[in-house]
Amino acid sequence: MEVGRLCVKLAGRDAGRVAVVVDTLDSKFVLIDGNVRRRKCNIMHLEPLDEIIKIKKGASHSEVSSEFKKLKLDTWETKAKKKTEKPISKRKQNKKTIKEVVKETKSETKETKKEIKKEEKKVEKPVKKKEVKK
Amino acid sequence: MHFHRRMPGKAQCSGCGDNLKGVPRNIPSKIHNTSKSKKRPERPFGGMLCSRCSRQKIKEDIRKIFSLK
């Protein structure tokens, strides 16, 4: 298994697809790219093919894809995941914790007491009429 | 006495005949409610062949193309 050899993957989700050896890590493991997700793989899970491609050791994904286009082969590309907020139902949006409810009831009683005191103070003052001096 | 249906048997590999892994065993009305990825492994020949038989089949297909060249 040299750098640049074409092979077919036998195991996993990517089984049956064509890949290229990019780097050798061990006597057992190998870096893989191509029509397959870029990661390390066991040599026992690969079946070598006839052809060898000219690639540098540790080539990037874009270089591999340009080489594959000449042979009319596809490459596997992943999109970055968008971060979205967790959806909250309407019921939970209006939900209040126990502390908040207790605070509101306490503050309401205080406010109602103040209002009652104000209303009691507000007595209609008698309107004084100015006497016109003749 | 309660009316109790009998459970179906386990799924088997069409190549060698061993019991398949990753396929749940239950009444069809309860299997239909689950999602698709929980009924079979995510692999070509997922619910049909065991892992050994699927690897052998891919090897044979490639070696035929070798001999034709």
Image: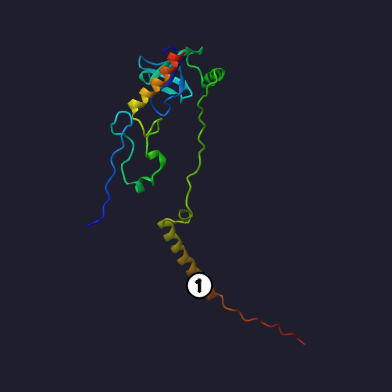
- Label 1 SS: helix
Chain label for disc 1: A
Residue B19: x, y in percent? 28, 34
- Residue A49 visible, this orientation: no
Q: Identify the amino acid type marked 1.
A: Lys
Query: Where is residue A1, by image quadrant?
Result: top left
In the figure, A104 relative to B42: above or below?
below
Residue drawn at the location 37% of the way across and 36% of the way down: B40
Give the percent coordinates (x, y) of residue A17: 45, 24
Image spot of residue B32 (x, y percent)? 38, 46
* A93 to the left or right of A10: right
At 50% across and 72% down in the image, what residue appears?
A116
Q: Count the marks: how many?
A: 1
Seen as rendered, the residue at the extreme right is A134
Q: Nearer the viewer, residue A30 or B27?
A: B27
Q: Residue furthest front?
A: B68
Label 1 packing within 10 angstroms: few (<14), some (14-19), many (20+): few
